[in-house]
Image (cartoon, helix red, strand yellow):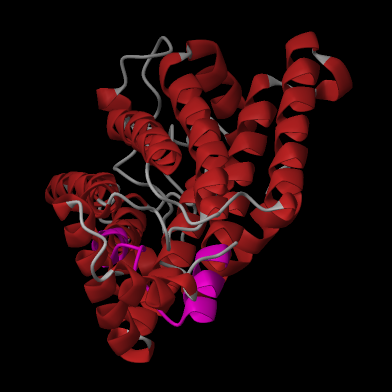
Amino acid sequence: GGGGGGETVATTRTLFSLTVALKSHLVTPLRASESSRGGSGIPAPTAHVPHNARAMGFPLHSNAVSDVNQVIGWIYFFAWSLSFYPQVYYNWSRKSVIGLNFDYLFYNVTGFVGYMTYNICLYYVPAIQREYLHKHGDKSTIPVQLNDVFFAVHAVLLTLITVFQCFIYERGGQRVSTFARFLMGFAWLYIIVTLILAFCGLLGLRWVNFLNGISYVKLGVTVVKYVPQAHMNFTRKSTVGWSIGNVLLDFTGGFFSFMQMLLQYFNDGDASIFEGDPVKLGLAFFSMFFDIFFMVQHYVLYPRHADATALAEKQRAAAAQSGGETGASDVTPLLRGHEIQ
């Protein structure tokens, strides 16, 4: 995830041609009558559609559908925002982060910081908005709304809180892997170099190119971040330490985001958003895929192991609170096999 994004844009176009009805955006994009940023209003989004589609009333241009899409956007926003809290509460209640993969958190910090930067710049900076419209056409729409900004800032804060918990709670010798450090080091090097080039106007790079690169870094992080956690669950044969509440809410957010894509495309008939912000389409697909995988691990593959480990940890916590050592020796062997060194 990074660079000029040519390959990813091409892939997104291919996905669009296969699904026809997909539209990648978290919330309903800016319409001409609603735009108060960046000078004069942005022309209402239009797109070339087949004649038979127009005969069937496509695009719809319905205010009612647009309002429903706004509601769906907020539903997905709250679902994805709340998805951070079950893990924080789970860690606090156990006073342990054993079972939560540190590579996953490390990837999340990079991804969400980049995503926050992208949303803030494209939402608040008129000059970058003009660059975006110049690149994608005046009939395109700004693909960032206020709840995009809130979500990204909130995600960074909650991710940092979870990271802080890793320093104060029991972690069983877990640490960030060398591979994850190398991968994210390369990502940050790319971001810094692209930032310098865009600031100096070198190699034809503009601010919108820098922000697009950041969005692809976020997409790349989403592709890889779940893999360490899934592998950790597999090696431990348990999902204890990885909150299923996080997974269920994340799936809910991804599902409603995907539904919004369908409605928004049918209503606006504007496909330019795929080129402008394909990361959101990728986020919906990848998050739902891995959420289903985690559900299978939790409810089908390792339910008994999860119950046994959870019981053992409750016994250990009770023993620690009572100040006694009784039962500790019975609990430790159960946990030791589930700790990642």
The answer to whether residue 203 is left or right of residue 245 is right
The answer to whether residue 260 is left or right of residue 98 is left
Q: Quadrant of the C terminus?
A: bottom right
In the rendered image, the vertical position of residue 165 relative to residue 310, given as above or below: above
- Residue span colored magenta: 228-250
Which residue occupies the foreground of this view, 48 or 23? Answer: 23
The image position of residue 6, as x and y in percent, is 74, 49
Could you tell me which residue is drawn at 63 percent across and 43 percent down? 217
Q: Quadrant of residue 298?
A: bottom left
Is 1 included in the stretch rendered in magenta? no
Which residue occupies the foreground of this view, 291 or 150? Answer: 291
The answer to whether residue 195 is left or right of residue 255 is right
Secondary structure mainly formed by the magenta segment: helix
The answer to whether residue 185 is left or right of residue 306 is right
In the rendered image, the vertical position of residue 204 relative to residue 308, given as above or below: above
Could you tell me which residue is drawn at 74 percent across and 38 percent down? 185
